Amino acid sequence: MKKGIYIILHNIRSTHNVGSIFRTAEACGVSKIFLSGYTPTPVDNFGREVKAISKTALGAEENIPWEYFPQPNQIIKQLKKGGFQIVGVEQSKKSVDYKKVKINSPTVFIFGNEVRGISKQLLSQCDIVAEIPMLGEKESLNVSVAVGVALFRILKI
């Protein structure tokens, strides 16, 4: 298990994407997942399991600690103070090819909304913005697929 690899999921709409990301993150040895904005959590406000997440996560949501924050800014500041490198996975003017990203310290990966991606405000807090190149006509991958592609390549699993 790789220690010090965290994920922030901000404003992910789909419970199925969240469950799939938990499953992929568990396979990659992610230490913790932070959920923020309107990203659904594995347990609802009444302490009940969210079945659509557990169905796709297949128990991974029970193996990875997770925490919810309304906004990710607070947790990003804490992680930066703790020596974490912040890597946003997104297309932007300052992005670099994800195959060239090297991590040498504890790292948190940020993934954003299925349609709008990561906001400019969040991107400004990233040390690196990693982009997965698109060769087809579509401009992006499904967020759960992007998590798998990015983590397996950058972590060299």
Image: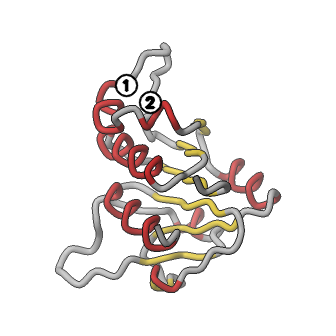
Q: Provide the residue designation for mark 2.
A: 42
Position of 16 compared to 157: left or right? left
Provide residue 104's location: percent of width, then percent of height.
69, 74
Q: Quick one: label 1 or label 2, which is nearer the N terminus?
A: 2
Residue 87 falls left or right of residue 39: right
- Corner quadrant of residue 48: top left
Residues at marks 1 and 2 touching, judged by CB atoms closer than 8 Å: yes
Q: Give 31 or 95, whichever is nearer the viewer.
A: 31
Compared with 93, 70 (above or below) is: above
- Residue at left offset 45%, top offset 71%: 90
Query: Looking at the picture, how far across and down is residue 111, in whole percent?
Result: 47, 59
The relative height of residue 27 versus residue 152 in the rendered view (above or below) is above
Quick one: label 2, few (<14), some, or many (20+) residues within 10 Å? many
Q: Which residue is mark 1?
A: 50
- List x then y, in percent, for residue 51: 31, 25
Amino acid type assigned to the residue bearing label 1 in the image:
Val
Q: Residue at x 58, y 37 (%)?
A: 65
Q: Secondary structure at mark 2?
A: loop
The residue that appears at 55% across and 53% down in the rendered structure is 7
Residue 74, percent across and down?
Answer: 71, 48
| Left or right of 56 in this view: 155 | right
